[in-house]
Structures are given as C-alpha cells and as structure tokens.
Image (spheres, helix red, strand yellow):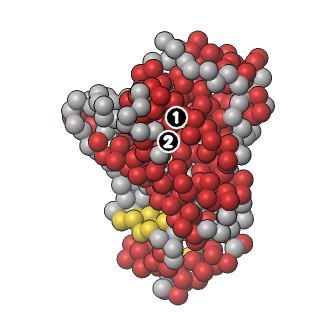
Amino acid sequence: MSATIDNTLGLGLVRQPKAVYFGPGQRRQIPFVVAPLGKHVLICTDARMATTPEFEEIRSGLVAAGLTVSVYSDTEPDLPRTNVVDLQEKFSQSGIEVVVGLGGGSCLDMAKVAGLVLARGGDIRDYFGENLVDGPGLPVITVPTTGGTGAEVSCISVVFDDEKGMKVGVGSAYLEAYAAVIDPELTLTCPPGLTAATGADALSHLIESFTDRSKNPTAEQVDKHLYVGKNVLTDFFCRTGIELLNKSLEAVVANPSDIQARSDTMLAAYCAGMALNTAGTAAAHAIQSPIGNLTHTPHGFGVGALLPYVMRYNLPVRVSVFAEMGRLMGVATGDQPELEQAHAAILRVEAILAALGVPLNLKDLGLTPEHFDFVAEQAMLATRLTANNPRDMSKEDIVQILERGYADDRSWWQI
C-alpha cells in the first residue's frame, strides 16, 4: 500500500519561500539577498548568538553592502509576547524595510511576526489564529542556526502569551519568508542539548506529517486553511527527510563536528518544514504544549518523549505508512508481514530518540498523574493540530496515552 492511500484527490500542495539557499558557507549570500529589498535591515536574534563571530560576520557583511543594520537581540526561548511588544516599541518608527531572522526557532518566529507587526501594526494578539493577517508584511530572510524546527520555511509563528499562560499560533501564508538561507556551518557551535532537542523535533515533524490525515479538501478549503492534509508533495519531502535523519542524527551525536551529518540534518529539517507547512503537526504537538508549560522542558524532548505512545495509538489506522517508514529506514523489507515492518519502524524511531538522550517516558519530564486531566483538556483545545491526527481522539484517549507514557508502557496498542 502507498502512504498516500487515502489521498483520493491525488492532491499535491506545498507553500515555500521564493528562494532557498542551502549548503556550507551559504550565509555569505545574505547581503546579496537583502540588498535589493531595502536599505534598513533589522536582525532578530538572541543574546547568545549576538556575541558570536558568525553573527558579526553577517552583520558586517550587510554593512559592507551599504545597508543600515539594526539589531534586536533579546529574543527569548518560546518567544514570549512581551518580546514582540518590546520590539514594536523600539523599531516601529525606525523605517525598517527588511527583517533577517538569525537563530533557532524562536528567533525565526520573531522575525516573521516582526515583519508583520512593523508593516501592519496592531497587537500580535490581533493575529492569533489562522488566516487573520490581511496582507503582506515586510520581506523576511530566515537564517536557522539549529537543525530541527523548520521555522525557516513554515508560515506559522508560535508566541507564548504569558497572560493566557499558553502558546498560540499566528498562521498565514503571508508569514512565509521571502528567502531562507540554510548554512549547516552555523550549527557547529549549537550546544549538544539543543542539537538533540531540535533533532527530535525534526523527526517528530516528519513522522506526524507522514502519518497525518489526508483531508481531500475542496478548492475553497485549500484557499481558507493552512493545514489541508498530507499529500503527494508532503510525502515526497517526508520520505527524503526520514531517510536523512535515520543516519544523520546518531552521527551528529557521535561527532558534533561532522559537517556532512550536520548538513543532512539541516536538509531533513528543511524537508520537515516543507511538509508540515500544509500537512501540519498532530497529536504529539497538541499534547506537548501543556506539558511543556507545566514542566518547562524543551519542546523537542517533550514531543520526542510522546512519540512512542502517540505512534502506538495511531498504528492501527496507519499500518501501511509505518511499514513504509520501516523500509525507508532500512529496518524492514517488503517480504515481511506489514505489521512486523510497522513495528520495526517504531522501534527504530525509539532507538534514534534514545541516542539523542530524549526521555522515553513522561515521568522523566516531570509530569505527574494529577496533571493528566488538565493536559488532556488543553490538548483537545488545539483543534488545528488534533484535526490532523489520523485517528480520532477524545479527552479519554489522551489520558490513556498519558497513563501509558507515565508508566513507560510500550506494549502495542489495539483497537
């Protein structure tokens, strides 16, 4: 069976930047990309990145190209709304024409919403939700320094609203970057823990996008919604990304200076971003968000810890897709029973997560049973994600996933 078995329309859809520059050293292309777009550029980054030689190389390259460069270096992890408000106060009257995002997922998300609010004004809360942006923002160039989030090519930014105590998405095709510059050399100084967490995140993006629901949308639904289901083009990116991460993640852990492994990981993360942009993430991401808020654990470790249990929950309705994953990862062959191939894929994913140092149960994240009902209730509110999951979910189903995850119960789930 094909992984696109229920995509009866034969739909293929991806959203993407105008240009993507990929490869070691491609950061040197940034001045040539930015210069035609405007004379005053704002770099959005974080405090650590702003002190590095790589940052100074990029900043000075822009200055040498005759551009005025401003810097916002206060971006925090999980991008709090207060950062966006602070940036607006500092730069809304500065005549910024182009935005460069340099850093991990939060820095790239900051650049995308900065381009939006600097061009269109208002509170970022005005845009929380899907397709509430009424026009284009400033052109944004994304330059990732981690291999995992896919934010360089996705048209969503996630903002933590501290007053609401939850992460909220700003989703619109208008948030798509003008260009992405993906230079694996920028990940060489990434801390090992962050490398592991973002690698697990990329793996989760690929698995969820590959096993997602195919929605067979109408033309009107394609026009109005970002997540229109897995399709022949997202499957193409997922297959490539899964094959790459199957080898590269363990290689990066073994030798963080392995530039080929870094390159393969970043290419896979790009593939994952391209896939999730229209397929969307699903149950693992919906459940992780409230767990992350409670335990303050890294996002990638949270979704990674959930994957063994969410994959088992979805297995009964995605046997053929998991079986194909097993063949892609080299742990299964077509002459084996399909369910055996699927089991091999899930076990291989767990082996990669373990090599990354990801906790494989929820107790190690700090989650406790008294939180199960709250987490399940909050996850059910993330309908833009749960609607992508291939198997229908209720609050009770999520509680059962949490119970198994807490007990480290990796028996095979039966319907």
Give the quarter of the image for residue 209: top left
Give x and y (percent) for residue 253: 67, 57
Q: Which residue carries the number 2 mark?
A: 331
Give the quarter of the image for residue 285: top right
Q: Quadrant of the N terminus?
A: top left
State the residue at coordinates (28%, 37%). Answer: 222
Residue 94 or 281: which is nearer the viewer? 281
Earlier in the chain: of badge 1 and badge 2, it is 2
Q: Which residue carries the number 1 mark?
A: 344
State the residue at coordinates (68%, 54%). Answer: 194
Residue 231, visible in the rendered structure: yes
Give the mark count: 2
Side (left or right) of 226 relative to 191:
left
- 66 is higher (above) or lower (below) than 223: below
Side (left or right) of 193 relative to 304:
right
10 Å crowding of disc 2: few (<14), some (14-19), many (20+):
some
Q: Are marks 1 and 2 in contact (CB under 8 Å)?
A: yes
Disc 1 marks a residue whose amino acid type is Ala
Circle 1 sits in a helix, a strand or a loop, which is it? helix
Residue 325 or 87: which is nearer the viewer? 325
State the residue at coordinates (47%, 71%). Answer: 23
